[in-house]
């Protein structure tokens, strides 16, 4: 260390040149910058002159020309500044002792010698607030006022292996510089203490390789450089690097030997460091040997291991563990408080229980028998969940594997049993509890029955049971677990104190009312509902969230709505009104009276506890009765009238009970008593009944009037019929008489035309056929026709007798007239015949 007043001028027999700050022989000109010789005591004054602008070639003469007082003042000012810098240099010397290389403090001294003198105010502001500096490398690397000092502190801190990320970043930056700093950064980053935390980039690795190869021949750091090359390289080291490593391995420096042994993976040499007094070294060796899977480590672990030893081994232990590792770890766990459960669980879960093999499974089973029941309940469950999780193979587990798994199950039961309520709740909510439920046998079911009735943890268990079918699918457990879930739920329900399960089960069923796998549990509850009638109320209250699904099953099993109503309305927690709606939905008139009577009875029974619900149900029934009354179906009209009369008789007393009975909190959502609605329905039914009776009266009067009118009509019809019959009789008599007259006229005409003869002598001309083929061919017949016509005989009858018609008569009469014109004798004879009497 320089004396305070020599200002860092002397270094052995040499003195510092004020011009270029190099060390040169005393009393001689500088061979480097050609500055003249300056006495050491005037060095400070010379530096002050140089900084003020004096040329270095004239520096010696100008310094010699100064007055002694000037020399003293300038030297004292420079000495004060050098004293400030000297404190930083002393800190650098302390730090340098922690580095591999030397010379950093001398470099820093040269740097300050070149920078001084400077403005005193600036120097004071820059350094004085930090003086004196603490010895902490963390402080120096972050807050030292000099950049070189911060770099040196960062290097020393990284060498120790405890540096911050900022310090490591600084050293990684120095790696890419030149000279001693870069080499020291290489050595710091590749020390064994930094083997784990530092992650180097490819560029940094290549830089280290180049630096290491460049200093392999440098004494003192060649072996360390070879170690650095090995640390960042993945290929086999070249011969020069290998030679440097072996040279360091057989050297005297224990730290270098240890580094080389690590680089060469010499397990025997490295294992010797297990006895090192340095705890960090021992930890590193344990981790290293564990990562190598060294057989030298595990016997010592089994013999001397403790919790920290196990944790250090597990951090880098290869997997699957080497032979002897698992046995040593489990042995230490048995004699360690807490049994290293978390560490062993992480190790175990790295592969399935099946993949560990039968021998290791037996080791795990023995360990479980020894410590599992004393572990926290949730930790024990996690171990069992790991042991019970099926492997990736589709093959069923062997008998030995199953027995080993049962060891975990039995000990887990004890761990949960002795655990506090919060521990049980955590276990029941854990997804791994699905494995516990899946493998639960008769003994475990008895424990589940007891746990479910616990007032604190029971609800969490019930939730796990309800979620079991869904979680079973997620855990990819065998399909047989579906029926097992129903058996477990009923096993928990079975037994005394079922009322303790109602409230928590109701909350769970309502919360998890819609999820996959629920149907099998609903079916189990329904079977219980059918087979245990005395439990139906508790079942409906406990499984209120599944009430709709149970009701659907009831409807499928019983089609009669009245039977369903009688079976459910007292038990169902939803109350009377929903069942009243179901009872009266789409009801037909033939069954309405029976259903209404059942509803009235249920309402009268309910009104004492839930008056508004009962009144609402009665109102529903009243409107249904109104519908029946308004139907006007004559087949059921009398029944509807009777039911209305019964309803009118029961309503006043019921209304009084509704008004006087206080409404319980369960009816807080019903804000009125619905009596007005019931009275509205009753009023409408009465009005309908009155209208119907008035209509019936009018119909009776109309019927009487109709009957009277009908009687009158029948009398009129009877008289008209009598008159008609009399007229018919008269007409018949008239027709008979007319027929007789016609017969007499026909007989008379026939007589006249056949028997009537003229009372004169006959002549041949009378019977001469003049018109053959006609009705009157002879003159006698023609004259007889005219004589008969003159005598008043019926003309038509005469025509009928002779076969004439008015037309043919005219023809023949015309023909006879023409004949008489042509034969006068005919006319004369015709005249004689007409004038002669006929008889």
Image (cartoon, rainbow, N blue to C red):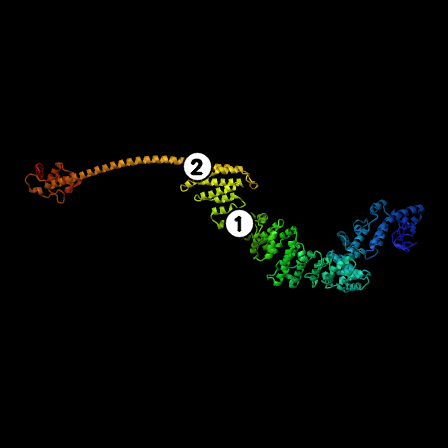
Q: Secondary structure at mark 1?
A: helix
Q: Position of residue 314 (x, y in %)?
A: 71, 58
Read off the residue under disc 1.
534
Q: Nearer the viewer, residue 634 or 67?
A: 634
Q: Nearer the viewer, residue 648 or 324?
A: 648
Q: Position of residue 721 (x, y in %)?
A: 26, 37
Q: Position of residue 582 (x, y in %)?
A: 49, 45
Where on the picture, by quarter, is residue 156? bottom right
Q: Which mark lies nearer to you, 1 or 2?
A: 1
Real-space Cα separation, disc 1 to disc 2, in angstroms: 45 Å
Residue most toward the left?
A: 761
Where on the picture, by quarter, is residue 752? top left
Q: Residue at x 48, y 42 (%)?
A: 601
Q: Nearer the viewer, residue 375 or 252?
A: 375
Q: Position of residue 175 (x, y in %)?
A: 77, 55
Q: Secondary structure at mark 2?
A: helix
Q: Residue at x 8, y 42 (%)?
A: 765
Q: Quadrant of the C terminus?
A: top left
Q: Is residue 623 visible?
A: yes
Q: Is residue 523 left or right of residue 247?
A: left
The residue carrying pointer 1 sits among few (fewer than 14), some (14 to 19) or many (20 or more) residues within 10 Å by Cα, namely few
Q: Is residue 612 left or right of residue 58?
A: left
Read off the residue under disc 2.
688
């Amino acid at each position: 260390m320089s004396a305070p007043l020599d200002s860092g001028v002397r270094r052995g027999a040499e003195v510092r040149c004020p011009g270029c700050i190099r060390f040169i022989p005393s009393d001689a000109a500088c061979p480097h910058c050609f500055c003249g010789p300056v006495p050491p005591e005037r060095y400070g004054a010379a530096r002050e002159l140089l900084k003020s602008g004096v040329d270095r070639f004239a520096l010696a003469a100008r310094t010699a020309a100064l007055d002694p007082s000037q020399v003293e003042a300038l030297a004292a000012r420079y000495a004060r500044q050098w004293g400030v810098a000297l404190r930083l240099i002393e800190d650098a010397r302390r730090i340098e002792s922690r580095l591999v290389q030397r010379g950093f403090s001398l470099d820093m001294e040269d740097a300050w010698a070149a920078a001084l003198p400077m403005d005193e105010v600036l120097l004071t502001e820059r350094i004085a607030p930090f003086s004196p500096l603490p010895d902490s490398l963390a402080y120096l690397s972050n807050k030292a006022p000099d950049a070189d000092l911060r770099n040196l502190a960062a290097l020393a801190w990284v060498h120790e292996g405890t540096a911050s990320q900022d310090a490591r970043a600084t050293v990684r930056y120095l790696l890419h510089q030149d000279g001693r700093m870069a080499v020291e950064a290489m050595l710091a980053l590749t020390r064994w203490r930094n083997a784990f935390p530092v992650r180097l980039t490819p560029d940094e690795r290549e830089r280290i390789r180049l630096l290491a190869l460049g200093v392999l021949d440098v004494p003192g750091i060649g072996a360390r450089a070879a170690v650095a090359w090995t640390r960042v390289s993945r290929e086999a080291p070249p011969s020069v690097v290998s030679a440097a490593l072996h040279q360091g391995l057989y050297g005297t420096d224990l730290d270098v030997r240890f580094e080389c042994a690590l680089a060469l993976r010499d397990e025997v040499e490295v294992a010797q460091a297990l006895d090192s007094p340095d705890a960090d070294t021992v930890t590193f060796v344990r981790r290293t040997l564990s990562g190598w899977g060294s057989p030298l480590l595990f016997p010592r672990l089994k013999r001397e291991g403790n919790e920290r030893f196990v944790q250090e081994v597990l951090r880098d232990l290869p997997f699957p563990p080497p032979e002897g590792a698992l046995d040593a770890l489990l042995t230490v766990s048995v004699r360690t408080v807490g049994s290293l459960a978390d560490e062993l669980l992480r190790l175990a879960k790295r592969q399935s229980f099946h993949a560990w093999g039968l021998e290791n499974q037996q080791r795990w089973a023995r360990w479980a028998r020894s410590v599992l029941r004393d572990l926290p309940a949730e930790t024990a469950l996690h171990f069992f969940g790991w042991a019970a999780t099926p492997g990736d193979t589709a093959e069923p587990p062997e008998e030995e594997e199953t027995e080993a798994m049962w060891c975990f199950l039995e000990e887990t039961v004890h761990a949960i049993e002795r655990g506090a309520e919060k521990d049980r709740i955590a276990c029941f909510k854990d997804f791994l509890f699905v494995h516990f439920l899946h493998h639960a046998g008769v003994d475990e079911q008895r424990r589940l029955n007891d746990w479910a009735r616990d007032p604190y943890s029971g609800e969490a268990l019930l939730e796990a049971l309800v979620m079991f079918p869904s979680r079973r699918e997620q855990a990819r457990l065998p399909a047989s677990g579906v029926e097992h879930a129903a058996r477990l739920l009923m096993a928990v329900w079975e037994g005394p104190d079922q009322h303790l399960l109602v409230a928590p089960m109701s909350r769970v069923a309502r919360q998890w009312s819609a999820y996959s796998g629920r149907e099998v549990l609903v079916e189990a509850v329904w079977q219980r509902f059918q087979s245990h009638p005395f439990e139906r109320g508790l079942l409906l209250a406990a499984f209120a969230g599944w009430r709709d699904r149970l009701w659907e099953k009831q409807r499928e099993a019983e089609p009669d709505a009245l039977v369903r109503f009688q079976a459910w309305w007292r038990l169902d927690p939803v109350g009377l009104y929903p069942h009243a709606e179901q009872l009266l939905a789409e009801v037909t008139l033939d069954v309405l009276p029976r259903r209404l009577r059942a509803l009235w009875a249920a309402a009268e029974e309910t009104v004492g506890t839930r008056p508004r619900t009962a009144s609402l149900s009665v109102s529903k029934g009243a409107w249904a009765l109104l519908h029946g009354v308004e139907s006007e179906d004559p087949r059921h009209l009398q029944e509807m009238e009777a039911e209305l009369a019964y309803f009118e008789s029961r309503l006043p007393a019921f209304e009084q009970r509704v008004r006087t009975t206080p409404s319980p909190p369960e009816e807080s959502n019903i804000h009125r008593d619905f009596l007005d609605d019931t009275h509205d329905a009753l009023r409408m039914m009465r009005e309908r009944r009155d209208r119907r009776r008035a209509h019936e009266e009018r119909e009776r009067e109309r019927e009487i009037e109709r009957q009277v009118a009908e009687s009158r009509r029948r009398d009129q019809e009877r008289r008209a019929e009598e008159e008609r019959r009399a007229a018919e009789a008269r007409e018949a008599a008239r027709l008979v008489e007319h027929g007789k007259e016609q017969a007499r006229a026909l007989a008379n005409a026939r007589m006249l035309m056949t028997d009537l003869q003229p009372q004169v002598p006959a002549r041949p001309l009378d019977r001469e056929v003049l018109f053959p083929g006609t009705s009157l061919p002879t003159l006698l017949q023609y004259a007889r026709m005219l004589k008969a016509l003159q005598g008043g005989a019926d003309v038509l009858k005469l025509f009928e007798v002779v076969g004439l018609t008015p037309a043919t008569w005219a023809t023949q009469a015309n023909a006879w007239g023409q004949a008489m014109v042509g034969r006068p004798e005919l006319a004369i004879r015709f005249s004689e015949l007409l004038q002669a009497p006929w008889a």
